[in-house]
Image: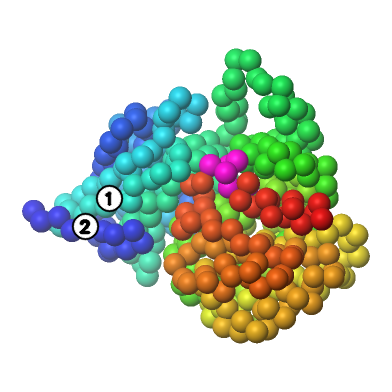
């Protein structure tokens, strides 16, 4: 029987027959698991994580490297079944380099296959594919999204209550590292209490801030998210959710309320909501469905963030992390906003990830603006190791603070 190859982001219809998804992992030993998700993008209960210690749940089972989904018997309140492969994040050198591949088989249907792009940034867990309901039937989407959080971190993002595993530490920590941990322990403790799935990035953010001498500084952190049509795949693959979580963790260090105002830039009036340590799981997926897809209208979102900052009466500077995937449609207006906010204590960090052109943002620092920086987070910022990611996020902001 012929085999049809899927590319990342592509989808294909499934029949009502049971589907067998077999994972092949070149390199380190890995575990295969599945998550049953409701309409809100989260598990209904902890039992919806199907793995070697809990190998069967509501029509979905895991045996070795294979997931079987009996689609007829999957309950109606399960909207998606996510197939995940993970290595042990505590094992020395155990990361994905060559990406896992997947074979999808159903009786009477052509065999499907998917080979995700290879990874280069220390990924320890991969969302390989998802089965999802569409118009009364089922389809499969090739995802191939890697993260450095391990299975426990990813499962927690989907609402599973998982006890976090501590990261490995040197047998004799250096004095510098002990000092780092001491300076950041307050924020890390808060994250551990309210959002234990974010402990690893919380430590990475603390190290980056301490290294740059601003661990004790305060700032009101804002997040602007690009909601243009070309970003749709990145929302569906949870890349935007993962990015927002990392900004939220940074806010836990810089802003003591553990809350980040989030502005979605779309075609209509930008939506302003918030993400908190207490509600971060699946939050971006819940919010972005309220916003129409737009066309590069970032200036309105910038104005909304500045207006909120001024109305809040905050005395600390504002650190506005603005995710962009392509050029703005009104470059003159965007540049004018940057100039006019220089005296308001607002620092703008434009973070590029996506598939568009970003030359406008990359060239802003060359135009003489001192309250602006650009960070290229690659097309998969969730796969960038924590300390490296936060170094890119805060380096220019630290220089600006210390002027």
Tag 2–tag 1 contact (CB < 8 Å): yes
In the displayed structure, 289 sits above or below 213; it is below
Residue farthest toward the top in the current orientation of the protein: 171
Name the spot of residue 35 as percent of width and height, x first: 45, 45
Residue 282 appears in view:
no
Which label belongs to residue 115? 1
* Helix, strand or loop for disc 2: strand
Q: Could you say which quadrant of the image residue 136 lies in?
A: bottom left
Observer-nearest residue: 264 or 287?
264
The label number, if any, that marks residue 5 in the structure image: 2
Q: Position of residue 42 (x, y in %)?
A: 54, 51
User: Is residue 97 part of the magenta span, yes or no?
Assistant: no
Q: Nearer the viewer, residue 72 or 331?
A: 331
Picture coordinates of residue 169 (x, y %)? 60, 22
Q: Position of residue 147 (x, y in %)?
A: 48, 45
Which residue sits at x=83%, y=47%?
217
Residue 386 on the magenta span:
yes
The image quarter containing residue 397 is: bottom right
Q: Which residues are magenta?
A: 385-390
- Which element type, helix, strand or loop, lies under badge 1? strand
Mark closer to the chain start, 2 or 1: 2
User: CA–CA distance between discs 2 and 1?
Assistant: 8 Å
């Amino acid at each position: 029987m012929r085999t049809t190859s899927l590319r990342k982001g592509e989808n294909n219809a499934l029949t009502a027959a049971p589907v067998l998804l077999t994972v092949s992992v070149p390199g380190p030993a890995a575990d295969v698991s599945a998550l049953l998700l409701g309409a809100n993008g989260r598990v209904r209960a902890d039992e919806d994580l199907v793995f070697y210690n809990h190998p069967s749940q509501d029509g979905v089972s895991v045996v070795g490297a294979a997931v079987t989904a009996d689609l007829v018997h999957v309950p109606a309140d399960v909207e998606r079944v996510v197939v995940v492969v993970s290595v042990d994040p505590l094992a020395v050198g155990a990361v994905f380099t060559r990406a896992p591949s997947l074979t999808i088989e159903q009786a009477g249907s052509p065999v499907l296959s998917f080979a995700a792009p290879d990874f280069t940034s220390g990924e320890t867990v991969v969302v390989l594919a998802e089965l999802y309901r569409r118009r009364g039937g089922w389809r499969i989407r090739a995802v191939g999204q890697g993260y450095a959080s391990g299975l426990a971190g990813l499962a927690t993002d989907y609402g599973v209550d998982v006890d976090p595993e501590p990261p490995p530490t040197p047998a004799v920590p250096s004095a510098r590292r002990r000092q780092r941990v001491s300076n950041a322990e307050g924020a890390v403790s808060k994250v551990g209490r309210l959002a234990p799935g974010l402990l690893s990035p919380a430590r990475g953010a603390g190290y980056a801030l301490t290294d740059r001498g601003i661990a004790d500084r305060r700032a009101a952190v804002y997040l602007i998210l690009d909601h243009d049509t070309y970003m749709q795949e990145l929302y569906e693959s949870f890349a935007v959710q993962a990015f927002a979580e990392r900004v939220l963790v940074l806010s836990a260090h810089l802003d003591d309320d553990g809350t980040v105002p989030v502005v979605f830039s779309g075609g209509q009036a930008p939506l302003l909501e918030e993400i908190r340590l207490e509600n971060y799981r699946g939050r971006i997926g819940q919010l972005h469905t309220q916003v129409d897809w737009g066309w590069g209208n970032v200036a309105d979102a910038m104005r909304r963030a500045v207006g909120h900052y001024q109305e809040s009466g905050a005395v600390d500077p504002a650190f506005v992390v603005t995710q962009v995937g392509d050029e703005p449609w009104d470059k003159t207006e965007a540049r004018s906003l940057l100039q006019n906010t220089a005296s308001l204590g607002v620092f703008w960090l434009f973070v590029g990830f996506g598939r568009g052109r970003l030359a406008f943002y990359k060239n802003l620092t060359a135009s003489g603006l001192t309250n602006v920086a650009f960070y290229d987070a690659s097309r998969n910022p969730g796969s960038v190791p924590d300390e490296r990611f936060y170094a890119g996020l805060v380096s220019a902001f630290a220089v600006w603070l210390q002027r």
